[in-house]
Image (tube, coloured by chain):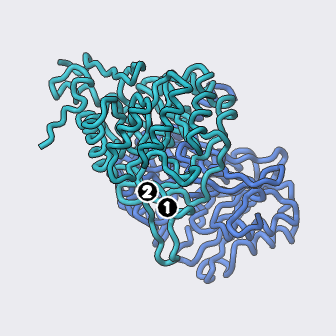
Chain colours: A blue, B cyan
Amino acid sequence: MSDTQSTLLAPVCMEGEILENRQVTPVTWIMKIHAPDAAPRMRAGQFVNLATSVDIVPLLRRPMSIHRVVQHMGVATGFCVLYDVIGPGTRNLHAMKKGQRIGFIGPLGNSITVPDGATRAVLIAGGVGVGPIKFVAEALLAMGMRHITVAYGSRDSDHCVPVKEVAPDGCRVLVCTDDGSVGRKGFVTEFVTDEITRGRLTPNDYVFTCGPVAMFRAVRDLLLPHGIPAEAATEEYMGCGFGVCFGCPLRQRQPDGSVEYKLCCVDGCLFPLDTLVFEGDPA
Amino acid sequence: MTAGAIDLSVQIGALTLANPVSTASGTYGKGLEFQPFYDVSRLGSVVVKTITTEARAGNPPPRLAELPGGLLNSIGLPNPGVEAYIETYLPKLRSLGSPLIINIAGHSVDDFGVLAARFAREDGIAAFELNMSCPNVASGLDYSTQPKVARQVLERVRGETDLPLIAKLSPNVTDIRPIGEAVVEGGADAISAINTLVGMLVDWRRRRPVLGRGYGGVSGPCIKPIALRMVRLLFETVDVPIVGIGGIQDADDAMDFLVAGASVIQVGTANYYRPTAALDILEGLPERIAALGATSVREIVGTLQMP
């Protein structure tokens, strides 16, 4: 990458105006932020670190996947984040109103790497891991990919994000909930099994996944015997988001078999799924 | 006096710094990470993350936990070790354009000397800061809780280099003053105060500490009053410059420390949530110094009037 390119892609630390902060499920919100200086730098799979307070509680910013980049007349002018209201940070976020300004650092982390020749993609999301899916799907469509399947699972109807917020038009979206209140009853991994069984998911396809560790583990165990690689968007508690606090390590298997700590924020947050070593995995 | 004409330069031993704003070790990575946000060369100095003789992977996660106005951490000094550091990072650090203060931590008194000797052979280093509160030390001693050991560390390093030495002290002591006196006797040109306060957060439902390693160090705005008091105590006790650290996130915080007795201030945890904090502080100092009727930062250092 040239110096000019890397400068154009470097993160910025600034404020943007909130254009919209709307509720899409009883617990899920989407915030749209005007950020014409930052948006053109954003690539699918990256994240931003949002200041949820101008005060010192909560002290730290909150890392959020970029849900989509807002385009105006073909120019990227802003971005959206999708979040569940869970703790003090996201409670502050959902109380913010249109017209308020919000601080952010971004874009941060790496972006998707689609293998040459891949013509199909399966995007697997669990819970609020649905956050980055729309941006990834839009990027794949823009690359000319025509067969994109999104497999999305959530707890129940209170947590299930409407399909139009999950993926752009032109994608096939499969929805399930744990209790069957929306879509199929069961886990998202059952869709993955179906796709493999029907020959619609092979090692030549691109797989992206974001969700809880239990889902990562299940998806990995399904894909591994078939030699299907996947990119996992990980999440860890972060202090800074740009590689200085060393507070967000996760364990990754190296080519020589050893296991090393990598930083979620700057070494990821996307990692090859089969290299991640989760709590409870054999060392 | 206009804010533009304020002299911000400060002195640590033979080293003159263009301004008193610096960064706290462990919160500034390699400095390079801040280049997208501002011109790092504007800072008076930069203190890099602690370097040890051997590579360290760091502690098991979770390494961080938030608390009201603060942060608890147990990062564990991850670093590639001195040789890899010199080969890989030092050339890039020299390009930062700000005086570079190398922070070292030994596993023994001798280790501090070995590290200083190795770095002393390299160009582009302005000073050393000695991380004397590393919890992983031979014989279980913390180098800045016992005056005799603290003095030995300084004497050992002093024997290896003529560069300015800054002893970074732990606040986890009954009285910081005898430690301060000991490091000055050992050859310290300045004292950094304070490192983090040891602490713990508990998840009672799981009956587990929140951090992977159990205990950690508390930093952030919530420790500022403790840091200010210790800076004042040291200012009244020793005759070397004090580097004030602890919860500094804006220019008013920095002024509090300067008036209390610090000649240099380091921005730590604020670098995480306000990446431009150090620069914002630098830009906010002249008008505040002028508001006190002073023309230089040196005129206001330690001018606190205690009751």
First in residue order: circle 1 vs circle 2: 2
Question: In terms of secondary structure, where does tag 2 sit?
Answer: strand
| Secondary structure category for the residue under label 1 | loop
Q: Note whether B281 is above or below B173 in the view shown.
A: above
Q: Nearer the viewer, residue B234 or B203?
A: B234
Determine the residue located farthest toward the front in the rendered image: B148
**Residue drawn at 18 percent across, 36 percent down:** B304
Q: Residue at x 64, y 71 (%)?
A: A153
Examine the image and state in which quarter residue B66 appears. bottom left
Residue B215 marker: 1
Q: Nearer the viewer, residue A211 or B298?
A: B298
Picture coordinates of residue A179 (x, y %)?
A: 61, 83
Task: Using residue A188 as the reference point, say whether residue A243 is left or right of it.
Answer: left
Is B14 situated left or right of A65 in this image?
Answer: left
Q: Are marks 1 and 2 in contact (CB under 8 Å)?
A: yes
Q: Is residue B264 left or right of residue A216?
A: left
Please indicate whether residue B144 sits to the left or right of residue B293 in the image.
Answer: right
Identity of the residue drawn at 49% across and 38% down: B152
* Within-10-Å neighbours for mark 1: few <14, some 14–19, many 20+: some
The residue that label 2 is drawn on is B198
Where is residue A122 shown, x and y percent of the image? 75, 60
In the rendered structure, which amino acid carries the disc numbered 2?
Val
Classify A51 as above or below A40: below
The chain ID associated with circle 1 is B
Camera-nearest residue between A108 and B18: B18
